Image (spheres, grey):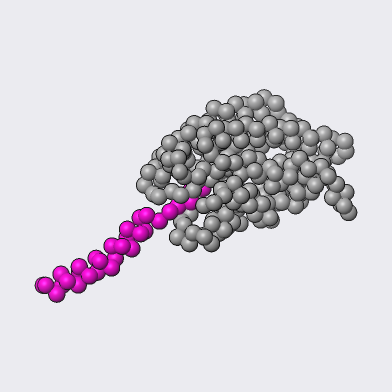
Amino acid sequence: MIRRLVVAAIFLLLVTPRLVLATQLPYYLALGDSLARGVQPLPNGTLIETHQGYVDDLYGALRLKHPFLQLAKLGCSGETTTTMRAGHGPCAYPLGDQLHQALAFIQTHKVALITISIGGDNIQHCISTAGVIDEACLQAGVAAIQNDLPQIVAALRLAAGPAVPIVGANLYDPVLAAWVLLPQPLGPIVAQESLQITQGVNILLDGIYTGFGAKVADVASAFRITDFSNVPVVNIPRNVFIALTRTWIGAPPPRGPDTHPNAFGYLAMAGAFYKAIGPF
C-alpha cells in the first residue's frame, strides 16, 4: 500500500507541472470573417478554408520566437460586424455569436494576442462585378460598422486587459481589377469609385481600432491600393496589377471572379499584421 502511494506521489509530481504548463500556454486568438479562416476558391468555385491564410502565416512567424504559442481560430466565413456582435450569422456558436465566444475564451485561457479582420462583408456585396454600386447598401454597411465595431473592440479590450495586443485589419480593394476586367471606359471609372469607397471605410476602421487602443494592420498599404504608377510590359496601374495577382478576382469562371486573397495575398496580409504587432 505504501509503495503504491509513493509511486502515485511520484507520478503526480511528474505530471502536475505539465498540466499546469498546459493550462498556462499563451494563445493567439484570431477573430473575424473568411479572411481569418484563410478561405480560397477551388477550381470548381467552391470556397474552402485553407492553411494558407494570413492567420496561419502570421502564427508560423510568431512561433519562431514563441514556440509554445497556441492558435485558436474563431472566425467565420461571411461574418459581418453585426453578426459577429449579435449572432444570426452563417456560423453557429455555443454562446450565440463570435464576440461572446471570444470573450468566454479570453476568460478561460491565457490570450497573448488578438487579431481581427471584419467589415469587408458589410460592403462587398454592394458593388457588383458588373460595376453597379448600390449606394443604399453601402450606407447601411458603413452604419453597421460605426455601430458594431466600437462595441466589439471595447468588449475585447475590457476582457483582455490593456497589455494584450489587439490588431485589426483595414481593407484591400479587389474591385480595382475592374480597371481591366470591365470594358473601357467603365472599368477605370468603377475602379476609381471603389477605391474612394475603400479609403473612406478604412478611415473609419482605423479610427475605431486606434480609438480603443488597438493597432492597425495596414493591409491597404500592403496591397498598395493608391499606387497608380505604371507596371512596365503589362502597362496597367500597380494597384490594379496587385489586385489581379494577389487575389482570385481575375481567375476565369468558375473559380473566379473571387475577391479572396490567394496565398501571396494572404502572405502580404500577414506581413502587415506582423509589422503592426511590433515587439512581441
Check the picture and name the quadrant holding the N terminus. bottom left
Count the marks: 0
Which residue corresponds to the image point at 28% horizontal and 68% vertical from the top-left? 14
x and y, in percent, of residue 52 in the image = 61, 57
Residue lying farthest to the left in this orientation: 1
Which residue corresponds to the image point at 74% horizontal and 32% vertical from the top-left? 196
Choose between 154 and 213: the one closer to the eye: 213
x and y, in percent, of residue 11 in the image = 24, 69
x and y, in percent, of residue 165 in the image = 50, 45
Residue 162 drawn above or below residue 255: above
Left or right of 84, for residue 47: right
Q: Is residue 13 among the parts visible in the rendering?
A: yes
Q: Is residue 253 among the parts visible in the rendering?
A: no
x and y, in percent, of residue 217 in the image = 61, 44
Q: Is residue 94 inside the magenta stretch? A: no
Residue lying farthest to the bottom in this orientation: 3
Q: Which image quarter: residue 20?
A: bottom left
Left or right of 225, for residue 32: left
Which residue corresponds to the image point at 35% horizontal and 55% vertical from the top-left? 23
Q: Is residue 17 inside the magenta stretch? A: yes
Which residue corresponds to the image point at 37% horizontal and 43% vertical from the top-left? 107
Choose between 201 and 126: the one closer to the eye: 201
- Magenta span: predominant SS is helix
The magenta region covers 1-30
